[in-house]
Amino acid sequence: MIEKTSLAPPAEIIRETLSKPSIFKSEEPLSLEYIPAKLPHRENQLKFLTELFRSLIDKPGTTSPKVLVTGDIGTGKTVLITKFGTDIARTAKALKLNLLYIPINCREYRGSLFMILKRVLQTFTPAFPQRGFSSEELLQILLDQLDRKNLHIILALDEADMLIKAEGETSLYNLTRIQEERPGRPVRLSLLMVVRDLRLLETLDRSTLSTLQRNIVRLEKYSSPQLESILRERAELSFNDGVVPETLVELVADMAASAGDARYAIELLWRAGKYADSEGARELKPDHVRAAQNSAHQVLRSEIWKYAQNLSAAGLLSTQLSSTGFRGKTTLLGLSAAPAADIRKWMESSLSGN
Ligand SMILES: Nc1ncnc2c1ncn2[C@@H]1O[C@H](COP(=O)(O)OP(=O)(O)OP(=O)(O)O)[C@@H](O)[C@H]1O
Ligand SMILES: [Mg+2]
């Protein structure tokens, strides 16, 4: 027999669903964009990072620290540098120092130093010409501009793996050593680079390597109790009082602990809430968490996984957990929606802009 609800027109299903109460009071603290007020288990790293850049505040114009932050997926690299950046910019402003923090995600610019520098220059000169310069020239122009404005910048390059892969040693050398070609002039450019995979550094020349290797802030994977305290804070802000039992936070933390990935843990909790809501449950139960875990298999632990998730969300790729016959838990990726040839044709034409 067909269930009655499946005969309801879509608009009615949506209206009815939205009219039901939710166990969430605000989903925002569980969203990816949310910047938490506190960073449990990263306070020491935040302190150390601040020490490394301290001279920019104490003795402006004398040093230009180059710092590398590294750690696995979801270990808090982006949130750490975002917090640091906001706070150091605020401090500099209060002290009336000419110091700017400029965050760039290298992935957004496909790792192209030219595109990244153009973006940085456009923060000073919005109508900066589009063409006609090499990235080396852009770097010189940037330093000239900083001289003219008497500014120092901390250029924060998140997901710099992309930059290293796309550019290789010459660009990285220029970026890290440019100031040595300007003896006697004040230093203008400090670097804060986030690199997930330190092995990439081996592709650089020895002098760049030695510059970058000097100051490294390493973020270890989170343990289960650490994830638990991160989750507890978010859960309190996101869910109504009393709907998330303590043991449930432990369960989510345990499930995410093998990866040590806070993002996965937070998303798992959010999705579990969604399963609870769609059942009309009054509180979060282990079954909701299990359903949430099964709906997104966190197995691939490299860059590919991010892409796979996007493609799967767009309905182009199907993901399924393997049964027996595979070592451990393996996610099988497949093409679901359409024949491979059609998907390929569609992708090629959208990439070429036709
Ligand atoms: N110590 C922490 N306290 C509170 N929230 C945290 C902490 N560490 C990470 N998070 C949260 O976990 C999520 C993932 O963190 P973040 O994006 O910083 O990871 P990442 O190391 O940059 O990952 P990726 O390598 O995929 O870029 C974010 O929502 C972030 O706010
Ligand atoms: Mg990140």
Image (cartoon, rainbow, N blue to C red):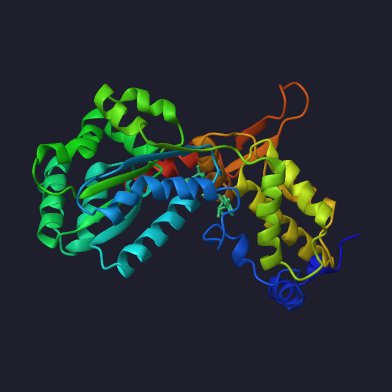
- Is residue 161 visible in the rendered structure shown here? yes
Q: Position of residue 249 (x, y in %)?
A: 76, 53
329 or 215, nearer to the observer: 215
Residue at the spot x=51%, y=60% of the render?
A: 33
Across the whole image, how many numbered discs are drawn on residues? 0
204 or 181, nearer to the observer: 181
Q: Quadrant of the N terminus?
A: bottom right
Residue at the spot x=17%, y=42% of the render?
A: 135
Determine whether 129 is above or below 262 in the image: below
Q: Position of residue 98 (x, y in %)?
A: 23, 62
109 or 321, nearer to the observer: 109
Residue positioned most to the front: 58
Residue 85's quadrant in the figure? bottom left
Determine whether 20 is above or below 204 in the image: below
Residue 321 left/right relative to 244: left
Residue 177's quadrant in the figure? top left
- Is residue 77 visible in the rendered structure shown here? no
Q: Position of residue 74 (x, y in %)?
A: 56, 44
Residue at the spot x=72%, y=22% of the render?
A: 326
Residue 277 left/right relative to 75: right
5 or 136, nearer to the observer: 136
Residue 178 left/right relative to 226: left
